[in-house]
Image (cartoon, helix red, strand yellow):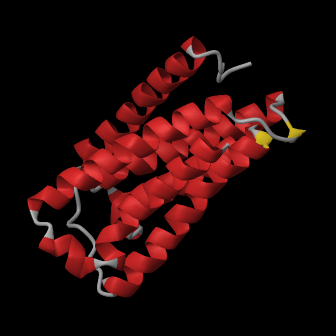
Amino acid sequence: MIWLILGVLLWSLAHLFKRMAPGPRASMGNAGKGAVAVSLLVAIVLMVIGYQAAEGAFFWGRTPMTAGINNLLMLVSVYLFAAAGMKTAAARKMRHPMLGAVKVWALAHLIVNGDVPSFVLFGGLLVWAVIEVIVINKSEPEWVPPEPAPARKEIMAVVGTVVVFGVIALIHGWLGYPVFG
């Protein structure tokens, strides 16, 4: 469990570093981007290894109903992620669509994974995303929504969402975590 906790903490601190310590981060220049990228890669490895090895109490599991709710929330999450990159209507209404996507993703996974390692991983990343939004909003209180995107970007985001969700479902199946059924 320690590797999982360290991974979530490293992920959180690496992302918050720019906002919580702007002076030291700025003094690192471009090397700081590399250090953060390496930290995030190490964090992901720690979270994957830690989650696979972690044991803990089991409170609830996946049911057909919770799997359906999870899948619907995951479609929303993937769409919000696409909206952030493509500056669709959702990105013009939400200040942080990518962090919103993380929050929806984490909640979706908590609905179908009711064990302590899942609470640490998905709950920890949910807490990080909430804190990140608060810190960004405090450090940059002014927000200007992006310019309207062409309708084709909305269509591309929806089509991309379905395709990416399909790929995610396929990979989950290969790893032994079937998304459907």
Q: Is residue 51 above or below residue 93?
A: above
- Where does residue 28 sit, x and y in percent of width and height? 15, 67
Residue 8 relative to residue 15: left or right: right
Along the line of sight, the residue nearer the viewer: 62 or 93: 62
Tell me if I can see residue 97 in this picture: no
- Where does residue 154 sit, x and y in percent of width and height? 32, 46
Along the line of sight, the residue nearer the viewer: 173 or 74: 173
Q: Is residue 141 above or below residue 114?
A: below
Q: Residue furthest left?
A: 30
Image quadrant assignment for residue 111:
top right
Q: What residue is shown at x 44% (from left), y 40% (from top)?
A: 44
Q: Residue furthest top?
A: 174
Q: What residue is shown at x 39% (from left), y 68% (from top)?
A: 16
Q: What residue is shown at x 66% (from left), y 30% (from top)?
A: 53
Q: What residue is shown at x 51% (from left), y 72% (from top)?
A: 131
Residue 106 relative to residue 113: left or right: left
- Where does residue 85 sit, x and y in percent of width and height? 28, 50
Along the line of sight, the residue nearer the viewer: 107 or 157: 107
Quadrant location of the N terminus? top right
Quadrant location of the C terminus? top right
Count the numbered circles shown. 0
Residue 33 relative to residue 52: left or right: left
- Where does residue 19 sit, x and y in percent of width and height? 33, 76
Tell me if I can see residue 159 in this picture: yes
Image quadrant assignment for residue 60:
top right
